[in-house]
Image (tube, grey):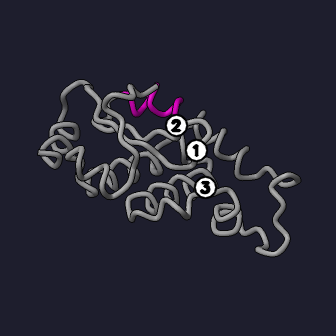
Amino acid sequence: MPDTEDTFELSADAHAAAGIAPELIQLELARITGSRSFEASPRHQQLLRHLVEQAVAGNIGALKEQVLAIEVFARPYDAFDPARDTIVRVEARRLRQRLGRYYGDEGSDAALEIHLPVGSYVPTVRLRDGPPHAATRRARDLVE
């Protein structure tokens, strides 16, 4: 689980203030969605991609349950009832679990960690200290 000290909400201002280039965030997103951990779940790929892209673009207001139900899960605008249809909450919980497994296994060497805090649909990002290798060095060069 990310440290709150060096964890930043994925908004345009926050990641800029943290010195994290949007290109680095996009590289990590592509790495996650193309991983073995995510290959069997197009739904989680789509949800994570949507959350990260909206946050990086500064559209934090669009990261609400009703909006996500309509935009990501194609629920009807006039008929979606979050009390009866828990698709967004359930899939967000599953996405959190999948991200945890990813970073515990094949993403353990990632230079950057994208996290979805419990109770929020706004992703956070933090720089990680991982074993040095070519991809990690390239990612750190992008940050600098």
Numbered circle sitting on residue 120: 1
Residue 107 lies in the magenta-colored region: yes
Q: Nearer the viewer, residue 131 or 8?
A: 8
**Labels 1 and 2: the sequence-earlier one:** 2
Residue 35 lies in the magenta-colored region: no
Q: Quadrant of the C terminus?
A: top left
| Amino acid type, callout 3 | Pro
Q: Secondary structure at mark 1?
A: loop
**Residue marked by disc 3:** 42
Whether pointer 3 and pointer 2 mark residues with C-beta atoms closer than 8 Å, the reply is no
Q: Is residue 72 above or below residue 17?
A: below
Classify residue 126 as left or right of residue 95. left
Q: Secondary structure at mark 2?
A: helix
The stretch of residues the image draws in magenta is: 100-108
Q: Residue at x 66, y 39 (%)?
A: 93
**Residue marked by disc 2:** 99
- Which percent across, then down, holds residue 48? 52, 52
Q: Nearer the viewer, residue 59 or 136?
A: 59
| Amino acid type, callout 1 | Ser
Quadrant of the image occupied by residue 129: top left
Q: Residues within 10 Å of mark 3 (few under 14, many from 20)?
A: few
